[in-house]
Amino acid sequence: SGPFKAHPRTLRTGVLRIPRRISCRRPFSMLAHAAACSRPIAVDSSAVRRGTRGISDGTLSRQTAAGRASATTLHSSSPSSVVTTMAAGVEVDVAAIIVGGGRVGQALAGMAGPGVADVILRRGDVFPASAPPGPIYVCTRNDALQGVVDSVPVARREDLVFLQNGMLQPWLDARALGDNTQALIYFAVAKLGEKPTDGITDNNPEGLTAANGKWAGALAARLASGGMTCHVLDRDTFTGSMYEKLIWICAFMAVGTAHPGSTVGDVERTHGDEVVALIEELMAGSTNARGVTFEAGTVTRLMAYARAVAHFPTAVKELEWRNGFFHAISAEAKAAGELDPFPKHTAILEQVGAV
């Protein structure tokens, strides 16, 4: 993916050096058991010291447990070296409020474990006084977010978990919600009531869905109970992944719209050079303008994801949350008398009439 420096997903904790990406995925051989991310995980201490991606690459030996532990733990070969995956927060599935009864909301509700009783709120429903104290999964369109926030008592707003596509961070920051849990959803639900399809690619069989924040572990556990993958990331790594996902949707939708009738697969196969050039421009501009660090292999990951969802149609939409984020950075630079950091992106938006 060019000259971008890899961002190490590692964190020093005592004598251990553990990967920052904590994978919560049920091994196929254990589908009848409780969620993998709520079990103790045994880690090869030599792999830990090397800082390898053993957790998501399947080099861990998972100890089966007859139920869910109160927290996910990592054990080195030394019994005295134990760390939790998240210093604060919940790492097991808990009763939640699900705002939105559409495809994603229904899918999340369907993944709840035995005895986990969610409350589903639809448009117009009043926030219940007896609501469970756990996460509030927001499964609505972006244009409904303000109404959702307004409907939740101030004391409970820190429990809001945002699952939307696009760049939410500036919007959240402006409402004192910048530290709330966010998730990058790579699974898809084709129709209401259908089982989700995980975002597994030929490049990332460990999955791409990720979360960060207070309720990231609880979300990962919920997804794992439904057979979906999820990675709990530290804030810096999550930020890079957030930009990566935004760049994917902005680049593929823009190039596809510039070639009418194109699916995501058409863009990947037929217009690959064009979309790669746009991806690299958006990465470079994000690094220069916002200090974003991308992990090595970004372009390869994004092209692989395109192959996994090749049938998706393309369209530039929800401009404020997607391509409009980069266009605003371009406008800001030009207003300051600087060069547009995203000239290809600006040109293609003008070509398709999006701006």
Image (tube, rainbow, N blue to C red):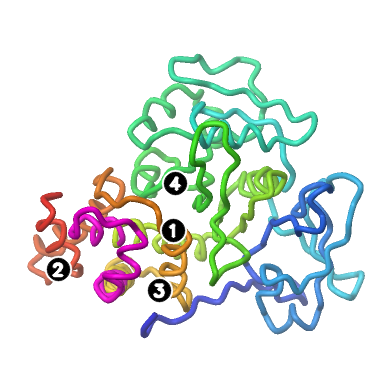
Q: Give the number of the disc on residue 161.
A: none
Residue density around tag 4, few if under 14, some if 14–19, many if 20 or more, within 10 Å: some
SS at mark 3 in the image: helix
SS at mark 2 in the image: loop
**Mark 3 or mark 1, which is nearer the start of the sequence?**
1
- Position of residue 47 relative to residue 271, above or below, is below
In front of the other: 86 or 27: 27
Numbered range of the magenta stretch: 252-279
On the question of residue 89 being in view, the answer is no
**From the viewer's perspective, is 12 left or right of 350?**
right
**From the viewer's perspective, is 191 left or right of 275?**
right
Asked if labels 2 and 1 touch by Cβ distance under 8 angstroms, the answer is no
SS at mark 1 in the image: helix
Q: Amino acid at mark 3?
A: Val
Q: Residue at x 51, y 42 (%)?
A: 189
Mark 4 = which residue?
178
- Position of residue 161 relative to residue 37, above or below, is above
- In the rendered image, residue 257 lying in the magenta stretch gets the answer yes
Residue 96 occupies quadrant: top right
Residues under labels 4 and 2: Cα distance? 27 Å
Q: Residue at x 7, y 67 (%)?
A: 337
Residue density around tag 3, few if under 14, some if 14–19, many if 20 or more, within 10 Å: many
Q: Amino acid at mark 1?
A: Met
Image depth: mark 1 or mark 4 in front = 1
Asked if labels 4 and 1 touch by Cβ distance under 8 angstroms, the answer is no
**From the viewer's perspective, is 350 left or right of 221?**
left
Question: Residue 293 location in percent, x, y?
Answer: 42, 72
**Mark 4 or mark 1, which is nearer the start of the sequence?**
4
